[in-house]
Amino acid sequence: MDCILSLKKIIMNVLSLCLCVSVVIFLFIPVTRVQADDVPLEVLRAKVAALEKEAAVLEEQNQGLSRMLKEMDDDAPYIVVDTENNRLTLRQGDKVLLTAVVGTGSRQFIEEETGRNWYFESPMGSLTVLGKERNPVWIRPDWSYVEENMPVPAENDPDRIVREVLGKYALILGNGYKIHGTKYTELLGTHFTHGCVSVGDKDLEKLYKTVKIGTKVYIY
Amino acid sequence: MQGRANKKYGTMVILLALMLLGMDGKPREGDELRQLEARQSQLAARIKMLKQEQDFLLFQRSFAGADSKYLLIDLSTKTGTLKYRNRILRTFGFTLSASKSQKPRKGRYVLTGKTDGSPGKMSLVVQDSFIIHGKRYSGKQKREKSLPALVVGRKDLAAIYYAVEQGTMLYIFR
């Protein structure tokens, strides 16, 4: 009987110990955990909600910006001229429609006795195709005579009109600059022009057929 | 004596039952805590990514109406693009110099220097972050030796070198 009572007492003590340990675990550990993180659940919930909102706002803003950028892409073909490597590229969006070896400004300087001078460089920057010509004629400018040590004729002198030197087609860029053909095809790929962009016959034909008035031209 | 023991035993059972009831609530709270913490870090990462994306979009938008050329560098595909507004002027490939393991970080940069244009010595210095030069580059300055380099083809370098100027903006993405 004594033995049974002692056993019961032991069991009771073990249970009491378990109870105490449980109390410690369930009352103190969660508290210390919250204290360690220092973020009560409600605060964390609010933080997450705020982050969700911030992410949603950013997503919406980014979608708007992407749309805006996409709307700016008109998908029209445009011409790019690399004057350093004498290459012309016809592009449409990310696609390359044509790559051509061209001639660009000679980067040479000439001066007239009167002090007038010219620097033959292709016009850099953003230009526009202002017009298209078939069988263009070349109206010889003053520098062409100065360059050849010839007397400069009057402005309307018919001697200035020269045919069949600019190829079959020309795209007018303004200020006397054009994208046109050339008789000197062996010089394509070099800096030999007076500022215009010279193109071989086949490439010129494709350009002429693809490009519309208003097409953008970027020369760099 | 036995009655007292039974009473004590009964109290303990009740208390244990109460504790077990408590156990039902606390782990659930812990689960939520863990879920919230995970969600918080997920959202923080997403917001960081969205902010980077927005910075890139704003960069592009700022150039959409500007008269300045700019460079976009994609480190993952190792391609660069010279752009004017929304038009591509040139695309080029590059390699990241083998001796430099550190990659330039993503984001905006300004071209701070152009070395002289003689062949083999041409380079573009981008802040104190990296340089762009051609293959067989022989003009490396002391300062440049510690910088990562984007090595581009000779023709590409010539085209880019003369197309950009000090102050030109660059953006490294991906």
Image (cartoon, rainbow, N blue to C red):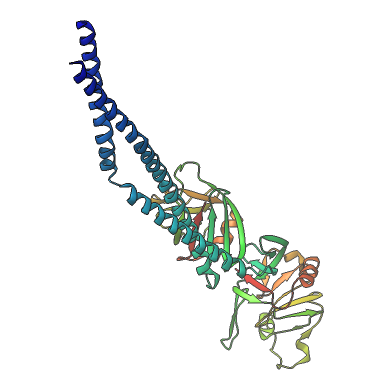
The quarter of the picture where residue A168 lies is bottom right
Tell me where residue B124 appears, x and y as whole percent: 48, 58
Q: Nearer the viewer, residue B85 or A145?
A: B85
- Find the residue positioned furthest to the left: B1
Q: Residue shown at 40%/48% (left/top)?
A: B40
Vertical order, A195 against B163 (above or below): below
Q: Would residue A197 appear left or right of A10 to someone viewing this image?
A: right
The quarter of the picture where residue B35 lies is top left
In this orientation, does residue B2 appear? Answer: yes
The quarter of the picture where residue A128 lies is bottom right
Vertical order, B103 against B10 (above or below): below
Tell me where residue B86 appears, x and y as whole percent: 59, 67
Q: Nearer the viewer, residue A104 or B151?
A: B151
Count numbered badges in the picture.
Answer: 0
Tell me where residue B130 appears, x and y as whole percent: 45, 52
Tell me where residue A76 appears, x and y as whole percent: 69, 70
Q: Residue shown at 50%/64% (left/top)?
A: A61
